[in-house]
Image: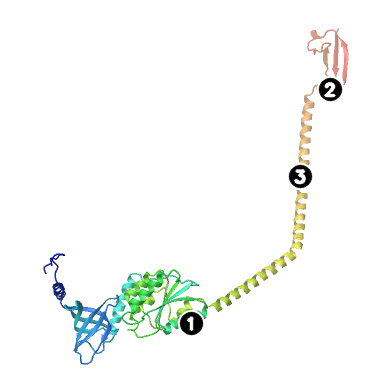
Amino acid sequence: MARLETSAESPVPVRVVAIRIGEWISRLGEIWVDGQIAQLTRRPGVATQFVTLRDPDANISLAVTCPRGVLPDTVSEGSRVVLRARPDFYLERGTLSLRALEVRQVGLGELLARLEALKRLLAAEGLFALDRKRPLPFLPRQIGLITGRASAAERDVVENTLRRLPGMRFRLENVAMQGASAVTEVVDALRRLDRDPDIDVIVIARGGGGVEDLLPFSNETLVRAVSDAFTPVVSAIGHETDTPLLDLVADLAASTPTDAAKRIVPDLADETRDVAQLRARARGRIRARVDREAELMAGLPERLRRTVRVRLDREVEEVAGLRARSRRRVASLVDAGRADLDHVRARVRALSPQATLDRGYAVVRRADGVVVREPADATGTLRVRVARGEFDATAV
């Protein structure tokens, strides 16, 4: 298809643009489309029925015209369908629609098979891993609650929470919890609450229902939005037997909305009772410890006296033993010293000149003190020393 050459000086008419758009769209031919019936208008006797087909994962829809006999009677608003259609562009209105040639309702078995395949895909990506689960705060400041307006689920969560913890604050987001717009509204509410810094935990609550009613809570867009949220998310969808994919990705899966209320806040009465019991146990422990210490202190002086007495007696014995050993050691040293002294004295005596004198020898000195060693040295008056004294002599 040749490109239109246009400018401000040579524009083309609207009809030309519309015709070219219609020609381009008509080249698409027949296509198969998967979607959910968001709006259905059945008019008896009318040859054409008009349907709004919505994308299950996005807020996008297309108008569909269904000739008589193409749309099965079992199809209703909210049904999941696959249709074979041809895109049509209406020149007069400039609108795009699909003209259905064949419509097939997706059966429950096929829906469950799709959910199982999606579950395996998300599990392989790690969205359901336990290490991704975040712990819930023990005492949240404010709870974000996503639920239907004036629903039983809202009443169960709010009333049971306030019964357990009076004064708890909520921020309610009332949205559609089933139907074509449920996924978009729940995801938008989740993101609004996730951006609120005062919200410490988010609860998505809905009562029970059929498998098709709970399909929005197994939607891939919603599951991924919960996985990306920064605030812990609690899933409280359906009854105990209902297990949408939201239960697997949420940080906590409650069996019912009432169970969610029990899991997100502590019971004030139970906590008060536990504190009282702990206080009583602490007092009992302290009292027992004080009594035991008092008993120990009461017998401490006598034990100290006995201990000191035993210690003193032992020390006295040790001192006496040391004294005796010291005395024996000193006596031994004195005896050894006396023996050594006697031995030295005997040696000194043996070597002393006195001993020589005692044997009859004498020492002769001249008057000038010189010892006479030769006869020639003996002159004049001499001084003779013998063993028991001295006397004078004259040399002849």
Query: Amino acid type of disc 2?
Result: Asp
Tag 1: Cα neighbours inside 10 Å, few (<14), some, or many (≥20)?
some
**Secondary structure under the numbered disc 2 in the rendered image:** helix
Tell me what residue is drawn at x 37 percent, y 76 percent: 246
Q: Which mark is residue 326?
A: 3
Tell me what residue is drawn at x 82 percent, y 11 percent: 368
On the image, the x and y values in percent for residue 386 come to 85, 18
Query: Amino acid type of disc 1?
Result: Glu
On the image, the x and y values in percent for residue 240 come to 41, 83
| Total numbered labels | 3
On the image, the x and y values in percent for residue 140 come to 48, 72
Tag 3: Cα neighbours inside 10 Å, few (<14), some, or many (≥20)?
few
Vertical position of residue 166 compared to residue 72: above or below: above
> What distance separates the C-alpha of mark 1 from that of mark 2?
136 Å
Tell me what residue is drawn at x 79 percent, y 23 percent: 352
Which corner quadrant holds the C terminus?
top right
Mark 1 or 2: the one toward you: 1
Vertical position of residue 46 compared to residue 278: above or below: below
**Secondary structure under the numbered disc 1 in the rendered image:** helix
Query: Amino acid type of disc 3?
Result: Ser
Badge 1 is on which residue? 159
Disc nearer the start of the sequence (1/2): 1
Badge 2 is on which residue? 358
